[in-house]
Image: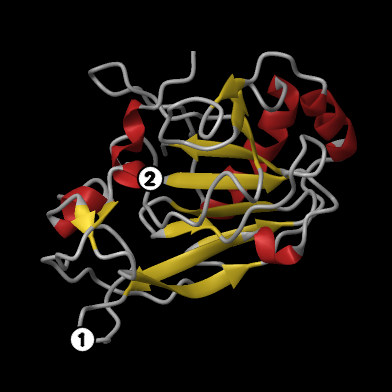
Amino acid sequence: MIDDRHRTDAMALKPTGKPASRVLPYRKPTEGRDFWLLDDALPNALQVRERCLAKTDWIEGYPHKPESWPGLRAIPGLEPEELAHLESWVKQTTGTRKLWEETAPDGARLNHNCVQVVGEDECQPRPHTDSLKLCRYAGVLYLNPDVPEDCGTSFYRQRLPNGQLGGNFVSLPHHNLVEALGSRFVPPDSFVEDVRVPHRFNRLLLYRANLIHSATAYWGFDLAEKRMAAVFFWMA
């Protein structure tokens, strides 16, 4: 079962005219420190894509069902040996000895190793962070060779009511963006794109989960055209 309870940090931010009450710290997202790229990540990426296209166990989100999350989802995305191949690189790259999938005391879990398919009419960018209670690193593996490069992933920072720029990451004791801002309600122009990572087929983007981020854009109208990606959430 795909559990969406963890997405309070991503989906509970609601547009309003009331400005956020806190300014976050800022550190420019830098490759090799805050995010990492692995091109040609899987030797069988086309086979993985074809296997995902053939799935019949999709869980439907918005606009197909009254859910807060968009498009289609299915778990697992990768087979164990494929996932192990990526995790070996993640551990080597970050210097982490152990990676695991965390479960909260209430049973909530992230949609780890989940393939997501989202079309351009199903969602807009939604800047968010992932829960530090459940992961330290997150990753996205792009699985459609025909999606434009502008459909990758972007990192965002705050835009304050006076036009000045604020921060871009959540730090303890806060675990998600809602906690860090002290509110679920933010103006619709509260975030501005800071760094964009282009979409490239079979590219794995690994990043620190406390950075504000979102898919830059979505694409396509049928299953084969839409932006397809596998997402991962690792505790370390």
Q: Amino acid at mark 2?
A: Asp
Can you say which quadrant of the picture contains the C terminus?
top left
Residue in front for this viewpoint, 101 or 76: 76
User: Colour scheme used in the picture?
Assistant: secondary structure
Picture coordinates of residue 113, whole percent (x, y): 59, 29
Residue holding disc 2: 130
Mark toward the viewer: 1 or 2: 1
- In the rendered view, does 92 fall on the left or right side of 109? right
Quadrant location of residue 78?
top right
Residue at the spot x=28%, y=43% of the render? 12
Picture coordinates of residue 28, whole percent (x, y): 42, 77
Residue in front for this viewpoint, 67 or 22: 67
Picture coordinates of residue 85, whole percent (x, y): 72, 35
Whether 160 is drawn above or below 66: the answer is below
Whether 137 is drawn above or below 150: the answer is above
Q: Earlier in the sequence, mark 1 or mark 2?
A: 2
Whether 94 is drawn above or below 154: the answer is above
Disc number for residue 162 = 1
- In the rendered view, does 203 fall on the left or right side of 105? right
Q: Label 1 vs label 2: CA separation? A: 27 Å
Q: Amino acid at mark 1?
A: Asn
Residue at the spot x=38%, y=45% of the render? 130
Residue at the spot x=53%, y=61% of the render? 35
Tag 1 secondary structure? loop
Quadrant location of residue 11?
top left
Residue in front for this viewpoint, 189 or 214: 189
Disc number for residue 140 = none
Tag 2 secondary structure? loop
